[in-house]
Image (spheres, grey):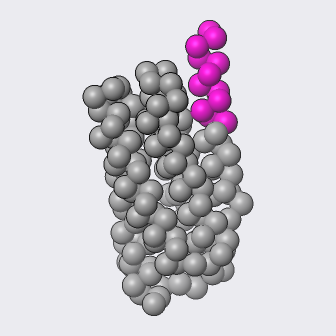
Amino acid sequence: MTKYASFLVFLLLVAITAYSGTTYLPGPFYAALQKPAWTPPGEVFSPVWATLYVLIALAGWIAWRAQGLGPLFWLWLLQLVLNGAWPYLMFGQKQITPALIDIGALWLVILAFIVTAWPVRRTAALLFVPYFLWVSFAAALNFEIWRLNS
């Protein structure tokens, strides 16, 4: 049971990051932006992110159990910081360009985590694949919003 208690720490760290997404909401700024036709409805984002956050916590916990405070942990922590910064930049500061730069960096760090985790714990790497795919989509959406509103 004790080994699973450490998973709660990873859930807590992810919850702190998710708090940024609930603090900085799209609001009127985002509603007024031109968006591509393929923009999903707003109600899609919460369940997708809730699922991804559980996978992120689990992947981080697995990586930490395999490697401790090694490179995987620091990549995992960096992606959390970048993840939490995006809603602040996009919705809190209403800055599309810095948000686009942030999500590009996030995409690279997620990819680095997957590549680095693969030889250590494939399960951790595979748990990040849906996250990578969603952030790829979100980055494309962010780019299109930037392009349409620049």
Furthest residue in direction right, as rendered:
23
Q: Which residues are magenta?
A: 1-12
Q: Is residue 104 above or below residue 121?
A: below
Which residue is at 64% across, 27% downward?
Answer: 8
Does the image show residue 15?
yes
Could you say where residue 133 lies in the image, as x and y percent from the top left? 34, 52
Q: Is residue 71 left or right of residue 46?
A: left
Q: Quadrant of residue 114?
A: top left
Toward which corner of the image does residue 6 lie, by quadrant?
A: top right
The x and y percentages for residue 39 are 42, 71
Q: In the shown orientation, is residue 136 left or right of residue 31?
A: left
Residue at left offset 62%, top offset 34%: 11
Which residue ends up furthest to the bottom in the rendered image?
A: 150
Magenta stretch prevailing secondary structure? helix
User: Does residue 63 show up magenta in the picture?
Assistant: no
* Along the viewing direction, whichever of 146 and 107 lies nearer the viewer: 107
Q: Residue furthest front?
A: 70
Residue 40 screen position, x and y as percent: 44, 66
Position of the N terminus by quadrant: top right
Q: Is residue 8 magenta?
A: yes
Q: Quadrant of the C terminus?
A: bottom left
Q: Residue at x 68, y 46 (%)?
A: 16
Foreground pick, 97 / 78: 78
Tell me the residue at 37%/55% (across/down): 108
User: In the depicted view, which residue is nearer to us: 75 or 10?
Assistant: 75
Horizontal side, residue 25 vs residue 75: left or right = right
| Camera sees residue 25 | no
Give x and y (percent) for residue 98. 52, 74
Q: How many marks?
A: 0
